[in-house]
Amino acid sequence: MTAIRDAILNLPRNGIAAVSTKGLGKRDVIPLWFGESDVVTPPFIREGAKKALDEGRTFYTFARGITELREAIAVWVTRQCGRPLDVERVTVPGSAMMGVQIALQCVCEPGDNVVIVAPMWPNIFQAVRGLGAEPRFVRLSGGANGEPWTLDLDRLFAACDKRTKAIFFASPGNPTGWIMRADEQRAILEFTRQRGIAIISDEVYTPIVYDVVAPSFAAIADDEDDVFIVNSFSKAWAMTGWRVGWLVHPLKLRVQMAEMSGFNNTGATTFAQYGALTAIRDGDEFLAFMREMSRKGRDIVEGFLKTQNRMSWSKPEGAFYGFLAVDGMTDSMAFAKRLVEEAKVGVAPGSAFGPAGDKDNDRFIRICFAQSSALLEEALGRLAKAL
């Protein structure tokens, strides 16, 4: 007998972690498996946190985040989407993943389901399972041989039933780089309004786009719509280790969010929030740098794929990942482990980004191309030799 819930005992292991543990920390392995670049957090952001430390800002603060940071986020979102955002809809609970967890806690109970647009970062559907709810996957079409990723709205809506509490998607997508169109957003918002279903929109990669803009739900959702928008300082501001993100939520939850943040995490680290405040106030130039670095990485991967006859992709519109289809590969986990051991390059297996046994995902591996050119080219060369 055990008191531990079956949903926890039976959680499958994160597929990215299953590969990365084989080579993490080994100097001869080039790590492209995680969603982070090789750029250190820039000095001006680090100085913001150092200054806060020197001023003794090491005590508890507001569970929803320091006021200055929440106000700066509201200004930034307003500037990005062209529509005023009430600061009372902004909470900084800790990491963006904490924001996801809180959003799910707001709507899900055991036995409910969340419809997820896939391929999707595994922490998302693992969090759904951890709450005792069911993740339901609706897969994007395309992804190989230059065929663009596309979402079938009819399939998405058909996957929803009376127990569906939320639709979850990431745009720009991880691992695909897919970007949802504005007309698709409006259709989904109208559908969820009619059905009493929440939207959880991962918009972490909105600053890293190339030839199109990634529209935000903040531009169309009303204050009281059941819409949760997750964002983070981790990717675009090169702050993965800081664990600071934010959540835009319905205005009606402004009081409850203080409690939710409080009993989940007691709020984000105080001095780290001052680094984040510096980032969002003064970081436009750095955002442009990260965007161009990622664009250059994307160009390097595209040029590399033109020399290969077994690998292809759908050129990503945003984010900084290559989701590479490998002809003839049927076990991406085994292939990724082999790459670590034999080629000394770390990639994420495609099988990690959806339900177990998804043969479509098993044709893919994911790499993060927001790296220095020399490092990325060396890694791709090792990958080519392995093939």
Image (cartoon, rainbow, N blue to C red):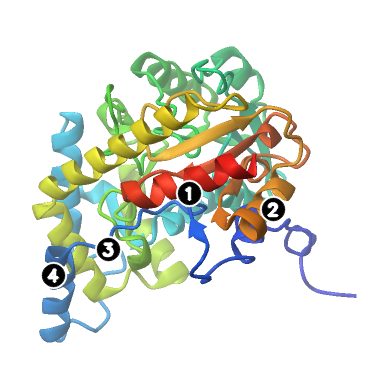
* Number of other residues with Cα within 10 Å of mark 3, as a class: few under 14, some 14 to 19, many 20 or more: few
CA separation, marks 1 and 4? 34 Å
Element assignment for label 4: helix
Nearer-N-terminus badge (2/3): 3
Mark toward the viewer: 2 or 4: 2
Residue drawn at x 75%, y 58% is: 7
In the picture, measured across the screen, residue 264 lies left or right of residue 326, that is left
Element assignment for label 2: helix
Label 1 is placed on what type of residue?
Ala
Please say whether residue 95 is visible from this viewpoint: yes
Nearer-N-terminus badge (4/3): 3
CA separation, marks 2 and 3? 29 Å
In the picture, measured across the screen, residue 113 lies left or right of residue 267, that is right
Element assignment for label 3: loop
Q: Which residue is mark 1?
A: 379
CA separation, marks 2 and 4? 42 Å
Looking at the figure, which quarter contains the C terminus? top right
In front of the other: 75 or 41: 41
CA separation, marks 3 and 1? 20 Å
Mark toward the viewer: 3 or 1: 1
Work out whether 289 lies above or below 155.
below
Work out whether 381 lies above or below 119.
below
CA separation, marks 4 and 3? 15 Å
Q: Which residue is mark 2?
A: 338
* Image location (x, y in percent) of residue 307: 49, 26
Looking at the figure, which quarter contains the N terminus? bottom right
Label 3 is placed on what type of residue?
Val
Q: Which residue is mark 4?
A: 48
Work out whether 146 lies above or below 312.
above
